[in-house]
Image (cartoon, rainbow, N blue to C red):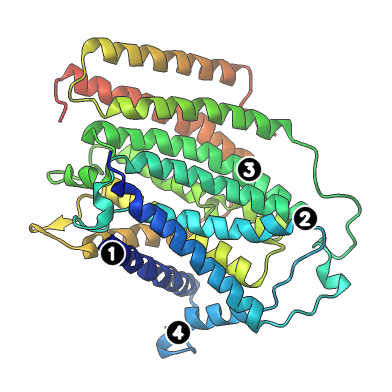
């Protein structure tokens, strides 16, 4: 019990640090792609910028607008933060971590990530503003639709590994990464996870020209920090799931190190930021057509095709 | 299924709740709060909010939610099935294929009736 508590805390604190430095990495990346320098004053080459930002956000005035449901208004950012971090506790960072023996982590993960839809809906509704309500409604429809296609594409991996535990899935990729046989599923999952975390080609929830800032217009100070942290934790979470499902095991030369997972995760997170620096925003109907008319038929046929191939050719693993 | 499997999860939930509570506490202690009527009003592009922002419900979003519910139920039905790929017999396989065919037919009906159009 004691050891498990210590290990959980040991995963919690680095998560927060990673999220903090992820914001710096994103700003540096965007700056480099636009031929700017980015934050380079605070600390050594701007390394302490996230700390300074956090300090500034904490010191700000906590503004609470009129007629908000103040309980929901304070509770929903806290909920979104803890949902994101709780989902992180299901990811086995290396083979001996306490999370690695959860036998149905995939189902738990889908359940928890669908709970994060509720927090966004509550955030938008509780703040009693038209902009945030519209933003949250958009976010809800978008996240629901994409979550469905994410679930269907995760099924493809489940067929090949025939297990719901993430550590077993990573172990079953010892010979070949699932990226090779399931490349279409990987690309679709990558784009769906962009939409699921409301990232840039699909960030219609916070499109500045229409909705100012989407569901978090009314938030300030610490509550905004919590929402912001939750968003970036979700990005890291999606890239962790992607790298565990498709990019092979965490073991190298019979030694299991978290560094392998970290490298793969950072590669995928880099892709998220790359997409932000590159693509313009889509229209809402394009977004909906993409998921309902291309991804859903494709993933439905993949979920039927893969078990059929495995049954017909007797090549179940 | 052991119970200890989920110990890290509950612990993480508690720790993150406590963490966000501490953050809130720190910010309420350090920041000074000076509410003004203009500052307190809801953001509305420079003018006073005319009517209540609680909008009437959009039917389109409701339809999307219903569709999502259908497909998500299906997914949660397939999940336990797909872990038994090793012991799979023809009967169980064909049953699931029939089930998925019915769902696909329903989806095609939805498509043809233009339930997926978005203006």
Regarding mark 4 in the picture, which secondary structure is present there? loop
Q: Chain of mark 2?
A: A
What chain letter is assigned to the residue under label 4?
Answer: A
Real-space Cα separation, disc 4 to disc 3, in angstroms: 38 Å
Q: Nearer the viewer, residue A123 or A7?
A: A7
Say which residue label 3 marks: A284
Question: Which x, y percent locates residue A76?
Answer: 61, 56
Q: Which residue is mark 4?
A: A48
Q: Marks 4 and 1: CB-CB under 8 Å?
A: no
Q: Report in which chain the residue with disc 1 lies.
A: A
Number of numbered labels in the structure image: 4
Residue A310: x, y in percent?
20, 23
Q: Residues within 10 Å of mark 4 (few under 14, many from 20)?
A: some
Q: On screen, A63 above or below A154?
A: below
- Label 1: which residue? A2
Distance between mark 2 and mark 3 Cα atoms = 21 Å
Pointer 2: what residue?
A129
Residues tagged 4 and 2 counted as in contact (Cβ below 8 A): no
């Amino acid at each position: 019990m004691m050891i498990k508590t210590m290990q959980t805390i040991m995963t919690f604190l680095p998560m927060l640090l990673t999220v903090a430095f992820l914001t710096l990495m994103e700003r540096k990346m965007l700056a480099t792609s636009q031929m700017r320098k980015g934050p380079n004053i605070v600390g050594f080459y701007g390394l302490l910028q996230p700390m300074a930002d956090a300090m500034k956000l904490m010191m700000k005035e906590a503004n609470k607008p009129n007629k908000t449901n103040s309980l929901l208004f304070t509770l929903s950012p806290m909920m979104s933060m803890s949902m994101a971090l709780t989902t992180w506790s299901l990811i086995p960072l290396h083979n001996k971590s306490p999370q690695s023996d959860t036998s149905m982590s995939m189902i738990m993960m889908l359940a928890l990530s669908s709970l994060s839809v509720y927090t966004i809906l509550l955030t938008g509704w509780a703040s009693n503003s038209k902009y945030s309500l519209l933003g949250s409604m958009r976010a809800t429809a978008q996240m629901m639709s994409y979550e469905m296609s994410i679930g269907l594409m995760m099924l493809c991996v489940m067929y090949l590994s025939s297990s719901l535990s993430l550590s077993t899935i990573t172990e079953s990729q010892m010979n070949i990464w699932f990226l090779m046989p399931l490349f279409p599923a990987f690309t679709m999952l990558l784009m769906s996870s962009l939409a699921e975390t409301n990232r840039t080609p699909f960030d219609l929830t916070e499109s500045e020209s229409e909705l100012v800032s989407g569901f978090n217009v009314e938030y300030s100070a610490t509550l905004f920090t919590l929402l912001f942290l939750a968003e970036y934790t979700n990005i890291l979470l999606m890239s962790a799931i992607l790298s565990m499902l498709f990019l092979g095991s965490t073991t190298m030369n019979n030694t299991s190190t978290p560094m392998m997972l970290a490298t793969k995760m950072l590669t995928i997170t880099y892709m998220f930021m790359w997409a932000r620096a590159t693509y313009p925003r889509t229209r809402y109907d394009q977004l909906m057509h993409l998921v309902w008319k291309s991804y859903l038929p494709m993933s439905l046929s993949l979920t039927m095709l893969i078990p059929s191939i495995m049954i017909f050719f007797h090549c179940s693993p | 299924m052991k119970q200890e499997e989920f110990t890290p999860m509950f612990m993480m939930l508690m720790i993150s709740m406590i963490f966000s509570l501490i953050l809130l506490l720190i910010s309420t202690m350090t920041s000074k709060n000076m509410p003004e009527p203009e500052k307190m009003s809801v953001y509305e592009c420079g003018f006073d909010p005319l009517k209540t922002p609680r909008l009437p419900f959009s039917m389109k979003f409701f339809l999307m939610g219903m569709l999502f519910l259908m497909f998500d139920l299906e997914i949660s039905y397939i999940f336990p099935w797909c872990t038994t790929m090793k012991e799979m017999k023809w009967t169980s396989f064909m049953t699931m294929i029939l089930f998925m065919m019915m769902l696909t037919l329903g989806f095609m009906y939805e498509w043809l009736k233009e339930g997926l159009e978005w203006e």
